[in-house]
Image (cartoon, grey):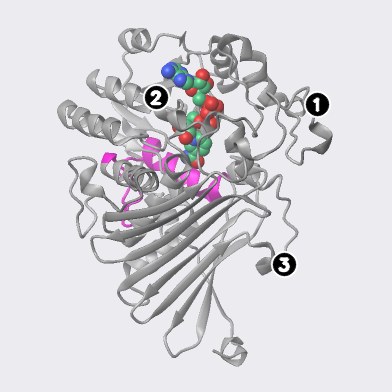
Amino acid sequence: MTNRQFNRRQFLTTSGLATSALLSAPAFSMMKKEKRRLALVGTGIRGTSFWGKRILDQYSDIIEFVGLCDINPGRLEFGKNYIGADCDTFTDFDEMMNTRKPDLLMVTTVDATHHQFIIKGLEMGCDVLTEKPMTTDEIKCQAILDAEKKSGKKLIVGFNYRWAPHFTKLKELLAVERVGKLTSVDFHWYLNVYHGASYFRRWHGLRDRSGTLLVHKATHHFDLLNWWIDSDPVEVVAHGELEHYGYNNPFRSGKCRGCPHKSKCDFYWDITKDEHLMNLYVNNEHHDGYIRDRCLWNKDIDIYDKMAVQIKYANDVQVSYSLTTYSPYEGWRVAFNGYHGRIDSWQDIPWMRQDKINQSELHAKEMSQDKNETFNDYDEVMVMDNFKDYEMIKIPRGGGGHGGGDKRLHDKIFRDPDMADPYQHSAGSRDGAMSVLIGIAARKSIEENRMVRIEELTDLQPSVKRIT
Ligand SMILES: NC(=O)c1ccc[n+]([C@@H]2O[C@H](COP(=O)([O-])OP(=O)(O)OC[C@H]3O[C@@H](n4cnc5c(N)ncnc54)[C@H](O)[C@@H]3O)[C@@H](O)[C@H]2O)c1
């Protein structure tokens, strides 16, 4: 292919989504007289900011917090004040559920504990909304599926990435087979030396807490793949190593604060400069011993820092996926190969945008719930038909977390659950299960050096067309 064939750039500006129109549909919950009673377990950074404070700021006309729970009483108290909730706090989950009887339980604890609260919540007659990953192993996954079936209640998994305009545009193009029948996908995700390193400082670095990044982080990416491809995964083969963080460094200390090696450690991070993290974690260390600025060279870190996964789907689509955790820049690339062409897309690859991106601030900006916060004006998708020229589609990036996706997710859950959803953004337990099962299968594939079939793991049978 010569350069000449690439020189006609046809920019199509698109609103990115049909959802803005859909959001104006009548608000079902607004018509209800009583507020929905919400309880939340896990008052860490995600529970208090994305779910706690944001819900109260945006939906206090239809939602009331009736209880907050955490095993760390200090973080619980700080979290309650930060959210601004007028409700009781509990260190005993059962007591909260029995005395407050919520309609909806929000689970935002450490990944490996989600199942306890999901199952109890369902058994106690509550709908449950859980953060990703739904859970961390196949046994807990089966127990969650069984509990939901038995309870007749609903489990929602908060997959916020699906709602981002950029990802939705890709779904839209694939749904109409813009480049013909899909045959294979290349998907590569790069975590930079700030965001990527942060996983190794926290509980995420321990596989019995996070299930490894193949579950904790890649659940987002596997869910996108399942949703885009619109089929279930069947077979998984993976490789993974820990060859950068953890035991790989010659020196280490307990935590960054007071570290004798700080002058020679590129990863030294001063948590004392962040007042919010000091209040949430450091000032409450004495309750549970959880160190938020733990040394990322600790020898007990037992997750992979580079991962490569091959997935075969029930509709014969093949996927090559990789995740790296020490890239100089943060971003991703995806390519969809169809019978008649190819769709390429990417985000935050610095040289492609010729941008000066501040890598240390990038992740915080992406997570920011400030709707005025924009740090890049648009994303791009390239569509190219075989034997023809290519076209570029520009997707405006909104503020308010994940390019505006976070707001759409919350509106659908809280403001208007009956809102039309032609691209099936909403995710339930089957979606939650299928995404973690790829990560669990990948982990098993690495450990047992073999191809793992998804049907080995739970009683879910992969379907050629995704079941919603
Ligand atoms: N969707 C996303 O983009 C996204 C982003 C960040 C985090 N998350 C998810 O949100 C969840 C919370 O992550 P975080 O970053 O807030 O972690 P965090 O460590 O800040 O918070 C977890 C909280 O759970 C509490 N906890 C742990 N075990 C508990 C138990 N048995 N009972 C009650 N409380 C318990 C801890 O004390 C802590 O306050 C995780 O599941 C994570 O994967 C999702």
Which residue was labeled with disc 1? 260
Q: Which type of secondary structure does the marked residue at label 1 adopt?
A: loop
Q: Is residue 418 magenta?
A: yes
User: What's the distance in space between the residues labelled 1 and 2, CA to CA?
Assistant: 34 Å
Question: Going 26% across and 43% down the picture, which residue do you hit?
Answer: 430
Question: Going 62% across and 59% down the picture, which residue do you hit?
Answer: 348
Residue 375 as seen in the image, left or right of residue 80: right
Q: Which type of secondary structure does the marked residue at label 2 adopt?
A: helix
Which residue was labeled with disc 2? 113
Q: Answer above or below: position of 312 versus 281.
A: below
Label 2 amino acid? Thr
Q: Answer above or below: position of 386 versus 214.
A: below
Badge 2 residue CB within 8 Å of ligand 1:
yes
Label 3 amino acid? Gln
Q: Residues within 10 Å of mark 3 (few under 14, many from 20)?
A: few
Q: Is residue 195 magenta?
A: no
Q: Which type of secondary structure does the marked residue at label 3 adopt?
A: loop
Q: Nearer the viewer, mark 3 or mark 1?
A: 1
Question: Going 65% across and 51% down the picture, which residue do you hit?
Answer: 374
Where residue 133 appears, x then y in whole percent? Answer: 40, 38
Which comes sooner in the sequence, label 3 or label 2? Answer: 2
**Depth check: 382 or 80 in front?**
382
**Depth check: 256 or 30 in front?**
256
Residue 254 as seen in the image, left or right of residue 411: right
Task: Find the magenta span and give its range.
Answer: 400-429
Question: Going 61% across and 36% down the picture, which residue do you hit?
Answer: 246
Which comes sooner in the sequence, label 1 or label 2? Answer: 2
Work out which residue is located at the far left of the displayed protein and give it: 150
